[in-house]
Amino acid sequence: MTSLIAQRAHWNRLRMLGIVIFGLAILLPMAYVILISLTPDTEVGGGAIFPTHIAWNNYAMMWQTVHLASDIKNSILIAGVTGICATVIALGAAYVIARFQFRGRKTFLYALVTMQTIPQVMMLLPLFVIFVIIQNAISVHLVGQYYTVIITYMTFALPFACWLLLSYMANIPVDLEEAGLMDGCTRLQVLRYVVLPLVLPGMVVTFVFSFLLAWSDVLFASVLTGPATQTVAVGLQAYIASGDAGGDVLWGQLMAASLTSGIPIVIIFLFLQKYIIGGLANGAVKG
């Protein structure tokens, strides 16, 4: 009995050590970014680890250095519309797949899985060529427009969103919908008043993941956006590239801009954390 207790205590210590190491691996890079954002640029270039004084002006000057305001606005617009459209379309697709049997149903499911296995970098050139061909054919400027980037992100967000919401739909008892139909509700009314409240946590999770997919992308945004529509990820990358080309990179302001660009994500998680936690838990239960 004593050896069993000692063994459990040993495993508890190992588990706590693993948690501490994992926590440090996450927190130390974030702490270093915060430290650099408060360090004067002259000291960052000199290799100083700790600043001699706090450079709060980095957070004021970054708005002119990185053009952060317009880039954040573009990212919120593109990622928000992508998340909303992907969630709404995936909701309808998941409901039809979960509740109806039709020809091509399995083929459609296999196609969703296949889309997840294709590396995104392989789609960049074909999509760009398609947009250019359409642009030249109908004389409409596509590259550099918001809707072009949103449509591109939808091609990747929709398959994942469909699979995610399909797992939630499978957990909703069909008896609830049949009871609503027997009470005189139409199929749309059942979807609105019965299914929608139950699947709301799953919709929130789907929106957040689709939003993050569009928010963090650099590859497609760097090719399909222009100066007026570039996202914050492209703006930060372009500023670093200017240093590679011989310009001066103000690392303190760059780190301050990086931290500021993450505020919208933090706000989303703070306001939606109840639905996100509940949605992830419900989506993991099959029954």
Image: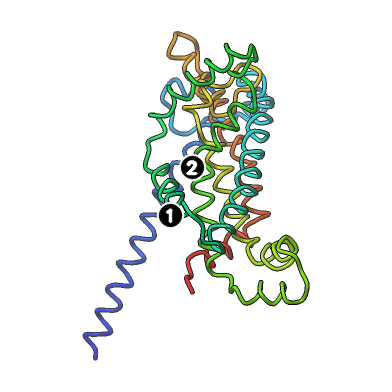
Does dot 2 land on a helix, a strand or a loop?
helix
Circle 2 residue: 30
Q: Quadrant of residue 75?
A: top right
Mark 1: few, some, or many residues within 10 Å (few <14, many ≥20)? Answer: few
Q: Which mark is residue 60?
A: none
Q: Nearer the viewer, mark 1 or mark 2?
A: 1
Q: CA distance from mark 1 to mark 2?
A: 44 Å
Pinpoint residue 220: horizontal percent, then vertical percent: 50, 27
Circle 1 residue: 106
* Sequence-earlier tag: 1 or 2: 2
In the picture, the quarter occupied by the N terminus is bottom left
Q: What residue type is disc 2 on?
A: Met
Q: Quadrant of residue 224?
A: top right
Residue depicted at x 66% and y 35%: 76
Residue depicted at x 47% and y 17%: 241
Pinpoint residue 57: horizontal percent, then vertical percent: 65, 26
